Image: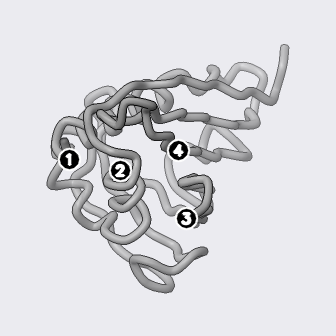
Amino acid sequence: MAMKGKLESVMEVKASADKVYGVFRKTSHHIPNHTAKNIHKVEVHEGDWETHGSIKYWNYTLDGKPEVLKERMLFDDEKKLVTVIGVDGDPLKLYKVYIGKFEMKPKDDGAGCFVTITVEYEKRDPASPPAYKYLDFLESVVQDLGEALA
């Protein structure tokens, strides 16, 4: 059984690539306002809201249960790519490695964008499930953001 995995999804959202990337890049503290059913609070643990490499602490609900994630957020402004590297929290109880990526690409017609969501993980135990529930969760967050920012 494979211990490492990579899941990917491409979504079309109504908001522009600049708006969606901008929320992750500069105002992630507003994300709970746009997807309150998923994310309840985000706080800076180290650094600040905008600095590449800052560490943030997220409180969210997944499958009806409260969870937390402490993560380091990295940015590639040219590609509009956000990388979230888990450093502590609930996903790391199942996975040695938990990385989420969001890449925003404008649509050719300028109406909205495509968001590629990638979840990379390495299981702690062969019996641990693939990270499908985390991919589904991130899709729900991006869908809410796309609607709210359109």
Q: Amino acid at mark 1?
A: Leu
Q: CA distance from mark 2 to mark 4?
A: 10 Å
Image quadrant in which you'd find residue 143: top left
Foreground pick, 80 / 65: 80
Q: Is residue 108 left or right of residue 117?
A: left
Foreground pick, 53 / 16: 16
State yes or no: discs 1 and 2 in contact (Cβ < 8 Å): yes
- Quick one: label 4 or label 3, which is nearer the N terminus? 3
Q: Which residue is mark 2?
A: 20
Residue 102 image label: 4
State yes or no: discs 2 and 4 in contact (Cβ < 8 Å): yes
Q: Which residue is mark 3?
A: 73
Q: Which residue is mark 1?
A: 149
- Quick one: label 1 or label 4, which is nearer the N terminus? 4
Residue 123 in percent (x, y) is at 74, 33
Q: CA distance from mark 4 to mark 3?
A: 11 Å
